[in-house]
Every structure is written in structure tokens, then in C-alpha cells.
């Protein structure tokens, strides 16, 4: 009979730094076209026995993750019943990825100004 052990790894307790920036051209018809980018850096290692065991197993100096992303933004701004409405679609191509999965990101956002 084999024994399965579960090791503990805590992520999300380490300090993190997130930055996002965008530049866009607003047109009179409400259309917005621009570019945006972001950066993420985990500032300290994950904790727990699972993190330490994994770090030792792969021979990594740290488990601190980081990623950058950049891409186009397409938006539309209008008023509905006197309330400002902002709709945006963003596509980010990730690069500079360390110690996390690389992916492309697509976000849809809606905002109300009141």
C-alpha cells in the first residue's frame, strides 16, 4: 500500500507589485483606440514546505514569478440615461515570463461613471 502525502505551499501571501499603463486616442463618435501594457513581479518567495521542497527539487534560486504583457485596446464611450458607460476590449501578448505559465490574455471590461 502506498501513502500519499500532501505538502503545503502558500502563494498569494508574498508581496507583489502590479503596474498597468495605457495610452489611447478618443474620437468624437465615442470610439477609443490605443495600446496598453502591464507588469507583475512577485517580491518574495512562496512559503510552506511544498514551496521549499519544489524549489530544492528543481534547483531554482527562487520561486518569484514575473510577467509583462502589451497589446491593443479598443473601447467605446457613451451615455445611457445620463450615466457614462465605457466598454473596453484588451488583448495582451505576454513576454518575459518567469516561474509561471505563459499565456495571451483577453479582457472585456465595462464601467459606469456616476
Image (cartoon, grey):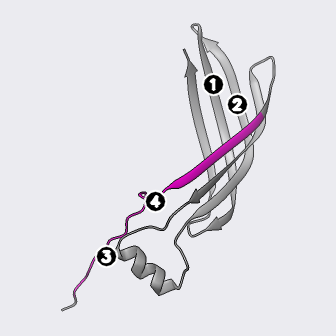
Cβ atoms under marks 4 and 2 closer than 8 Å: no
Along the horizontal axis of the image, is 37 left or right of 14?
right
Q: Nearer the viewer, mark 1 or mark 3?
A: 3
Dot 1 lies on which element?
Answer: strand
Residue 9 placement: quadrant: bottom left
Q: Nearer the viewer, mark 3 or mark 2?
A: 3
Disc number placed over residue 75 in the picture, else none: 2
Gap in angstroms between the C-alphas marked 1 and 4:
33 Å
Q: In the rendering, at what x and y percent does residue 36 appear?
A: 72, 43
Along the horizontal axis of the image, is 9 left or right of 70?
left
Q: Which residue is at the front of the view, 35 or 48?
A: 48
- Which residue corresponds to mark 1? 86
Instruction: Please tell me which residue is depicted at 73% across the width and 39% down the height of the picture.
Output: 22
> Which range of residues does the magenta coloring cover?
3-23
Disc number placed over residue 7 in the picture, else none: 3
Q: Nearer the viewer, mark 4 or mark 2?
A: 4
Q: Nearer the viewer, mark 1 or mark 4?
A: 4
Gap in angstroms between the C-alphas marked 1 and 2:
7 Å
Cβ atoms under marks 1 and 2 closer than 8 Å: yes
Q: Earlier in the sequence, mark 3 or mark 2?
A: 3
Amino acid at each position: 500500500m502506498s501513502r500519499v502525502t500532501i505538502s503545503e505551499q502558500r502563494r498569494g501571501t508574498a508581496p507583489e507589485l502590479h503596474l498597468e499603463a495605457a495610452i489611447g486616442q478618443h474620437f468624437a463618435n465615442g470610439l477609443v483606440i490605443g495600446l496598453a501594457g502591464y507588469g507583475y513581479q512577485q517580491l518574495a518567495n512562496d512559503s510552506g514546505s511544498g514551496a521549499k521542497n519544489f524549489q530544492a527539487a528543481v534547483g531554482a534560486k527562487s520561486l518569484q514569478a514575473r510577467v509583462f504583457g502589451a497589446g491593443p485596446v479598443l473601447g467605446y464611450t457613451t451615455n445611457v440615461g445620463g450615466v457614462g458607460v465605457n466598454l473596453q476590449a484588451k488583448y495582451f501578448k505576454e513576454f518575459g515570463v518567469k516561474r509561471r505559465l505563459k499565456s495571451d490574455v483577453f479582457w472585456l471590461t465595462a464601467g459606469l461613471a456616476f
